[in-house]
Amino acid sequence: MLLIIFILFAGLCLAGAINLLLQTHPINSALSLIVVMVSLAVLYLTLGAEFLAAAQVIVYAGAIMVLFTFVVMLLNAGKEERTLGSFASWSVGFPAVAVILAVIASVLIKSQGLGTVHLSDKITSTQELSAMLFKELVLPFEVTSVLVLIAILGAVALARRGDGERKGGQ
């Protein structure tokens, strides 16, 4: 039963990722990314990582995606001009994707224990995980938060009209 749920939500995750790339409107892409994040949370649940599943939904599907959606709506991103892509994307991108898919296919073909998962003897508790996150990894966590804030402020500054003057000459 868990294998069926895993396969179902892995397919939903892939479909959401492909839909994310194919959407033309940024809000629809953000909604597709939410589908991907929730599907990943269900995959974590099937693997027995309940804390990661809850963190995935609360942090990524909740807070980060609300922030992304807010920034996209704030910037008032409309229709984008569609192009056929650059020469570099066609000449380098597609062969690179073909090589990566070939490597993944060869690893899957050569693997013996496909689909078997063994739990280790030592299972990390939520208390140990939170101590690691908020004591040893607090600096990278906070640096990432500041970088995301700077990126949002930069996007808002770039989206302003003209040379920084408000509309109406104020």
Image: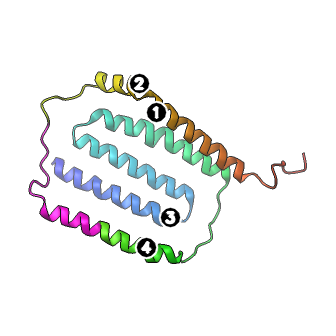
Q: Amino acid at mark 3?
A: Gln
In the picture of the structure, the residue carrying the numbered disc 3 is 23
| Sooner in the amino-acid sequence: mark 3 or mark 4 | 3
Position above or below: 72 against 60: below
In the picture of the structure, the residue carrying the numbered disc 2 is 134
Q: Nearer the viewer, residue 35 or 148?
A: 148
Q: Where residue 148 appears, x then y in whole percent?
A: 55, 41
Q: Are marks 2 and 1 in contact (CB under 8 Å)?
A: no
Q: Amino acid at mark 4?
A: Val
Name the quadrant containing residue 59.
top left
Describe the element under mark 4 as helix, strand or loop.
helix
Q: Where residue 102 appears, x then y in whole percent?
A: 25, 69
Marks 4 and 1, how far apart at CA: 34 Å
Q: Which residue is pictured at 50% across the width and 74% down the height?
A: 88
Q: Using the image, tell me which numbered label, if any, was put on residue 92.
A: 4
Marks 2 and 4, how far apart at CA: 41 Å
Instruction: Determine crowd level at label 2: few under 14, some 14-19, many 20+ residues with C-alpha closer than 10 A.
Output: few
In the picture of the structure, the residue carrying the numbered disc 1 is 141
